[in-house]
Amino acid sequence: MAEIRIDHLRKEFGDFVAVQDSTFTVGDGEFLALLGPSGCGKTTTLRMIAGLELPTGGTIRLGGEDVTFRRASERDIAFVFQLFALYPHMNVRRNIGFPLICQGVPKAEVKQRVEETARLLQIDHILDRSVSGLAGGDRQRVALGRAIVRRPKCFLMDEPLGTLDAEFRDVMVRELRELHNRIHATTVYVTHDQLEAMAMADKIAVMNHGVIEQFGTPQEIYDRPASMYVADFIGSPPMNFIRFTSGLEKGAARVRIGEAEVSVPEVHADVEPGELALGVRPEHIRFSDAAPLRGAIYGSEYLGTNQIVTVETGGGLVRARLPADRAYRVGEPVGLALKGERLSLFDCRSGRAIPSALYSGASHG
């Protein structure tokens, strides 16, 4: 396996810029998820790493070698597609072994490596079955086996679980992460599903309109979103934004929202007057009669062990994740107590997080 280093990568299609100045490194043996909505540039980035698209600018290094303009066949990578791309006239054994046969590997070695790979993926009992009769999860394992059997420098996966139903997808998320832990493969995985990215990846690059908004561990991105876009994209429900108009001086540790004063992480730089937003995750809110920030119940969603309660405040609608042991009536007045050390501040004009004690170590794209 090998490190992947991307420097100032750019891709243009005529006047449209699909990827803008992307720079990041996937360490040897790391699992990186490229996360974002359709059209954000994540698949284009993956295809450039694979050699299926040539960049307009920037460099791609694989294991220290510059492969920016090398053919895909010269990069020693394995690509797993969303639509499996299996050969229906071949059985499982021949599908997995096909890349080795094309490379002229001796038959005895092909047989050994195919069986080792099948045992790893727990599909050795179906090696002689036709792929056309397999369930979606088994087909995906065969597609993974065909990539693994080559023992490439890195694996590139383009939404490989996108066609599976919810039950199979949950199973495959666990199996992919367990597989990664066993073979320590350098992996770049494209997905629009934040739950997949959070469950599997060592690092996540959140993309938006061709730009990497933030690069970091799942916990860094969830706890310290670098922008309002990241805060809104990650989390279910996403982070709340309580908007207010103010300026902040360096060292400020409290903000005023209407008549309420709320403690926040200490601000590290002056902020000019304008529209700001206080960001808070639903699980970091509790109701308290003594809390100065007030609102009225707008509605609730019962989720079994907990509920999502929506409160209408002067700064907009706020959702709180609370125990389901109490029912709230619409219009009921409540006080919102916020965990000061878990709050975020954003400048609504730029959409970026305001530097504070919480964000001093945040990674940005």
Image (spheres, helix red, strand yellow):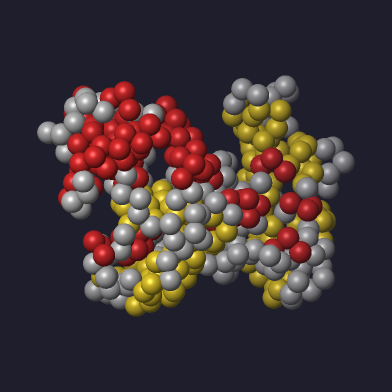
Q: Is residue 187 left or right of residue 278?
A: left
The quarter of the picture where residue 125 lies is top left
Q: Residue at x 42, y 48 (%)?
A: 192
The mark tally for this picture is 0
Q: Residue 157 at x, y = what percent?
A: 36, 49
Does 170 sit left or right of 242 as displayed?
Answer: left
Residue 99 visible in rendering: no
Q: Determine the residue positioned at 57% across, 45% down.
A: 235
Residue at x 49%, y 67% (from the top left corner)? 24
Task: Report which quarter residue 172 is drawn in.
Answer: top left
Q: Position of residue 220 (x, y in %)?
A: 63, 55
Q: Residue at x 68, y 50 (%)?
A: 280
Q: Report the quarter where the N terminus lies.
A: bottom left
Q: Is residue 159 left or right of residue 348?
A: left
Where is 147 relative to 331, above or below? below
Q: Position of residue 315 (x, y in %)?
A: 67, 52
Residue 154 shows in this picture? yes
Residue 34: image quadrant is bottom left
Q: Position of residue 118 (x, y in %)?
A: 34, 33
Q: Going by the picture, which residue comes out furthest to the left?
A: 89
Q: Nearer the viewer, residue 221 or 52?
A: 52
